[in-house]
Amino acid sequence: MKNEKILFVQPVVLCGGVGSRLWPLSRLDLPKQFHIFNDEFSLFQGVIKRLLNIKDEQLSISDPIIVAGEENRFHITEQLSQLLKDDADIILEPEQKNTAPAMTLAALTAQESGQDPILLVSPADQSIGDVEGYELILKNAINIASENHVVLLGVKPTHPETGYGYIETGATYRSNARKVKCFIEKPDIEKAVFYANAENFYWNSGVFIVKASVWLKLMKKYQPEMLNVVNTAWQNKKRDNNFIRPDKSAYTTISPLSVDHAVIERCPGETPVYMIPVDVGWSDVGAWDAVWNINKKDISGNACVGDVLALKSLNNYLHSTSRLVAVLGVEDLVVVETPDAVLITKRQSSQEVRQIVASLNQIGRSELAFHRKVNRPWGWYDTIDEGSNFKVKRISVKPQGSLSLQQHAHRAEHWVVVSGVAEVIVGDETIILRENQSTYIPLGKKHRLKNPSNKPLEIIEVQSGEYLGEDDIIRFEDKYGRE
């Protein structure tokens, strides 16, 4: 890199997507990027750590910009706080419109600093084995992008894969970067076999490195209408601490397009695009077979997570979240257990799990979108039993956490403190409850549950009434800004 010049780098993490092929673990209320698969950190946290830990005297790495949906804002802030990283800009899309509008929002936000930073854009759901090698590749990519080039990372295929897009490359540019000839959509198996065996074809990793100004110029050239609408939504944005909310009325009119379809695939022949090969144990963790690949295995090839017993079994992925999972005499299976659903499939069929998701959607099953245990900004709740006119929840409230001041039109509630201290508002009365103490919340009464201590609070809640849906709630005050 040039000794006299500091390069400003803006990490951008795109947090969209549900990861339907990783059902039943990945769901709408807790997508795959917020799960831990083979590390002490989630996929999202791993990406943040890799992008911020790049060390070079000639690089100035900014706090990250994260683009996500409104429904995931508290997962993001919680997981950032676990990394002791609370100063990211979090752009909340009113609706997910694929990666091109998301990246454009990030570019507009990045230029607010007065600089023209190099955007280092990564999906939130990737795993990297060789972190140090990956850092060297990113430094090389940043250097090339500083000369107003578009750079992306490509992965040499390890097998024929029909679920990825491919990049065809030409001559070497420099520092192992190759000029991109063209992009290929997800191929059929015959073409995938050919690409896997060819020297100049790579998987498209979805990682892009480009100056903010260069990206906006490309958007103006190839997607001027989209750029105008995104810019309108961004100009009329609202800020709420670290949250940035683009204008909904403008943003929802955008037609969804990926970065590749909107711009990058149109560039070769007009605007040079360069690709750097990565050989660092990359995975997009797209299906359960990929999860098996990145995990440690026992001497029989089984990757086991949680309370698992595998006897006379080979090359399985076995994942338990709430109870013992035992297998005997099986091979090449995926078994994933959650409290409300169990998946069993052949590893080779794991790409087809989305068919189960489609069927669940068609018949309207709640297991498609929601876990039994639901995370909230104040803690979590787990519905442990329910029946006609009753529901039982186990509720945990973080230290200093507080539920909203609320009331219900169709149900009454009984609360029993299991551990910790509860501050309870019922109507005009405030009471303190400790372990083994209880209270009753009449139907229609304003109430609030708060944990005033520095230790977690856990209660059992018994609801009774004619309707027990989560939408039976009127909020009057909420510290987390929910309506």
Image (cartoon, rainbow, N blue to C red):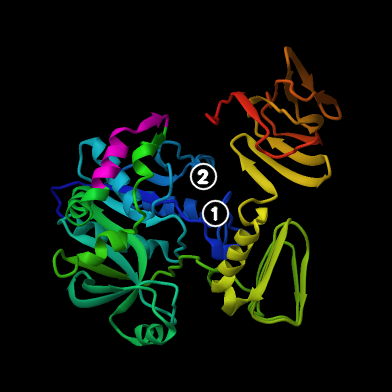
Toward the right, the furthest residue is 436
Q: Identify the residue shown where x is 15% and y is 57%.
A: 147
Give the residue at mark 1: 31
- Local packing at callout 2 (Cα closer than 10 Å; few below 14, some 14-19, many 20+) is some
Q: In front here: 121 or 454?
A: 121
Principal secondary structure, stretch drawn in magenta: helix
Q: Horizontal placement of 328 versus 288: left or right?
A: right
Q: Identify the residue shown where x is 32% and y is 45%.
A: 106
Q: Which mark is residue 72?
A: 2
Residue 467 on the magenta span: no
Q: Which residues are magenta?
A: 227-241
Q: Horizontal placement of 406 versus 326: left or right?
A: left
Q: Horizontal placement of 96 versus 25: left or right?
A: left
Q: In front here: 130 or 110?
A: 110
**Is 147 placed above or below 319 here?**
above
Q: Identify the residue shown where x is 58% and y is 49%.
A: 29
Q: In front here: 367 or 399?
A: 367
**Is 171 placed above or below 361 here?**
below
- Local packing at callout 1 (Cα closer than 10 Å; few below 14, some 14-19, many 20+) is many
Are discs 2 and 1 less than 8 Å apart at CB?
yes
Residue 388 in the image: x percent, y percent?
84, 44
Disc 2 marks a residue whose amino acid type is: Asn
Residue 262 in the image: x percent, y percent?
28, 59
